[in-house]
Amino acid sequence: MIYCIWYPSGGFGHFLNAVLSLRGKNFQRPKTQNLEFSKSGDSHSLDLVAPKYLKDPEKYEFKFTNNKNYSVLVDNGINNEGQKFLSVFPNSQVIKLCYSDYSWPVISTTLIHKAMKSSLDDNFTTGEWDSNHHWALREKYFLYLRDHQLKNAWRPSPNVSVNILIEDLLDYNIIKNKFDCCGIAVEDFTDLWTQWQETNIRYFEPVLIAKQIINNIKNNHDYNLESVTDIWTQAVIYYYIWLEFNVEVPHNDYANFFKDVNQVRQWLKL
């Protein structure tokens, strides 16, 4: 059986490929089975057992062994959700990595850091504003999160074997159950998942902080925000407020960011 891992650029497809190739039952193993994560958190160093299906190639040629399972990466770029690859792998099972409104901030950064091999600083400037105007950069980040054309892309598809949301990757049991649901037997991969989490949790931390703040707002609990000094994290919090309450924080009015959750609640008039 061929299992196609279909994913957006920066979407952790190589990690799922590593899990299946190294721990999947009766899966073809890579030549070198030592997985090392890079500084950016990717696992591209692991040998692929079959060529990556990259950007809808004119030809894809590889001889698969009938008595083995194979994990094949399908990477057409984040802008292409076409399913032309199904004509090349007609009897395959497809595992699609997706994201939601709430995990879009994760992909929006891994796309820059991993796929583009760039940084937020290189992609966002405040133009005429001095670098000390943090609110201007915060607004740039927020508008990127709110308005980017890719925000609503890569949603779950009904015609694939299993959809895995980016946020699902934070829970080992969810990933394991997803594999079980489509009949993929996988040995314990706790060590691989732990290594992946240690090297990639930084991409998730802003959304985890934002989620905690939203819960505190809703549950009427106070929470000091003075320690949240990272501008990107602040923008993600504004984005989460917009998602939950459908209102945009006036960036210039709160140029110094909120001091605590109670101040946010007062502004929301809750």
Image (tube, helix red, strand yellow):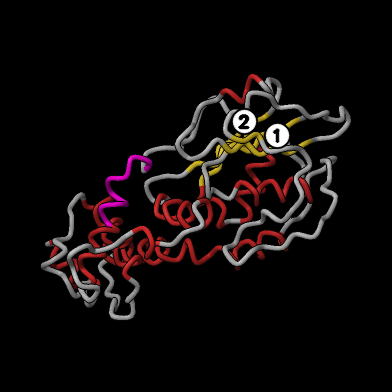
Q: Is residue 186 left or right of residue 125?
A: right
In the rendered view, would you say 249 is above or below 55?
A: below
Report which quarter residue 218 is drawn in: bottom left
- Left or right of 69 on screen, residue 19: left
x%, y% of residue 88? 67, 22
Amino acid beneath label 1 = Tyr
Magenta span has 123?
Answer: no
Q: Is residue 49 above or below residue 216?
A: above
Residue with the mark numbered 1 = 3
Residue 91 in the image, given as x and y percentages of width and height: 71, 21
Q: Which residues are magenta?
A: 142-150
Q: Quadrant of the N terminus?
A: top right
Q: Nearer the viewer, residue 158 or 126?
A: 126
Q: Residue 50: give its label.
A: none
Q: Which residue is mark 2?
A: 161
Residue at the (30%, 67%) spot, across then down: 234
Foreground mark, 1 or 2? 1
The answer to whether residue 186 is left or right of residue 174 is right
Closer to the camera, 76 or 229?
76
Q: Residue at x 63, y 56 (%)?
A: 172
Q: Quadrant of residue 180?
A: top right
Looking at the image, which residue is at 25% across and 73% down? 131
Secondary-structure class at tag 2: loop
Q: Are marks 1 and 2 in contact (CB under 8 Å)?
A: yes
